[in-house]
Amino acid sequence: MVRTEHQNKDNFIFYWDIWIALLATYLAIEVPYGLIVHYRPAGLILFLNLFVTCVFVADIFVRFKQPSPHHAHSPHANRSPADVYLKSWFTLDVVSAIPFELLFWNNTNFALSLILCLLRVLKMFRVASFQSTWEHRITINHAVMRLLFFFYFLGLFMHWIACGWIRIRMEDTNVHMLHTYILALYWCTTTVTTIGYGDITPDKNKSIEVIYTIFAQLTGAGAFGYIIGNIATLLTNIDIVKTRHRERVDRVDNYMKSKKMPKRLQERVHHYYNYMWHTRKGYDDAEILAELPESFRYEFTLFLNKSIIEKVPMFKDAEPSLLKEILYCLKPCLYAPGDAICSFGDIGDEMYFINKGAVEVLSKDGHHVYATIKEGGFFGEIALLLKQPRNATIRAVGYCDLYSLNKASFDRVISDYPGFEKHIQEMAKERMEKQQNN
């Protein structure tokens, strides 16, 4: 219950942050544009600005009550959310909640209006702080998340540069204002992206325009370098797993060729590694689980295998602690198409649970198919109870992901549960009597 409540709070803050980011983006676009055009906020614009102000005020109260999703893992986890908030984002949130563009819209001092505008847009620093939280919450590559944030802020920055270009270049901003803004944004795009067609250029006789253009060009050069660097990092991170898989395949391939192994066997090995890549991206379940802490390992195993174990009749009334130990004893195994998992007459000491794929139950001579066991099924339980010869051959239809449970591990676990052990002994006795009668 406590955990669910904590998750609900984290979900609320996550979606609240998205809402704040959307409203802050609106302000970052509208306020600078309104400052340049110098129009009186009215109608829908006035309503939206007042609405944003109300939400920003509400945001202050929310931050006092709700900690950030990673507050429990921060160095200040022993302090209250209110105390941490007061010493971090409180001042910025208060300043950005004041509707300066409504209070000073008719101010003739552009420098003062610009300062007040910048105070209002400071909320974008708050949006930038959401990146680390969203990287943990949204399951995409961190390099992709950084690029998305970068393009987001680059778009806003280009909007601000375009507004500044209008201010320093256009004398009459009331004539075809939308067209003027589009031309300014066009100039900004060609300059920042270092394309520079030259059809819109600064007036060489006006130093402010030349200096402003140099600033835009330097910004574009820095942005271009950042994009190339992040894309290179992203491609490297994406390919690193595939590269390691390819190296493993090449090593095995060279080994098989050096030993002059049959071509058919080499092809089967190649098919196996292709299957491993397409289904698991080269990862080994056992290797991943071994790196996790005990508590996480149990939750992973429980999620992957509990539904399989619960379908087995002998575990129907087993205690949760017993099931937990049984889950730990399961070993993942993979069989290729046509592989004989069990052969008729072999002494069995393992039972199997089918995670993916299907198997066929064959006759003694292997010519007749008695049954097909599909995903979620199991077989070989008699081996755990009686350790008798297999009464059928089990063959993999395609690639089969299985989990095996051997008798030694099984006997060790049930020895700590006398009641269940007695139940198993009775079940084994019934099976033995049934086989003798048949």
Image (spheres, grey):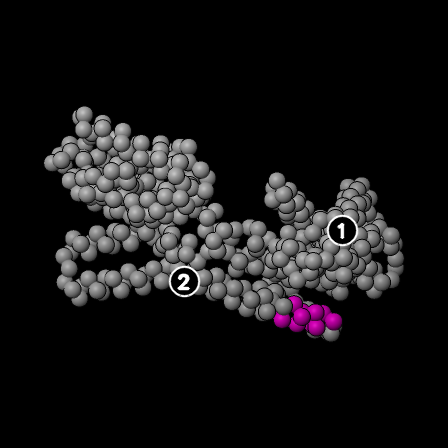
The residue lying toward the viewer, choosing from 24 and 172, is 24
Closer to the camera: disc 2 or disc 1? 1
The residue at the point 36 percent across, 38 percent down is 421
Residue 217 is covered by the magenta coloring:
yes
Would residue 273 be visible to someone looking at this image? yes
Image location of residue 327, percent across then percent down: 40, 45
Please give the residue where the numbered disc 2 appears in the rendered image.
240
The count of marks equals 2
Image location of residue 65, percent across then percent down: 74, 48
Question: The disc labelled 2 sits on which kind of residue?
Answer: Ile
What kind of element bears circle 1? helix
The residue at the point 77 percent across, 46 percent down is 58
Specify start and end residues of the magenta stretch as a single range.
208-218
The residue lying toward the viewer, choosing from 178 and 427, is 427
Label placed on residue 64: 1
Would residue 401 be visible to someone looking at this image? no
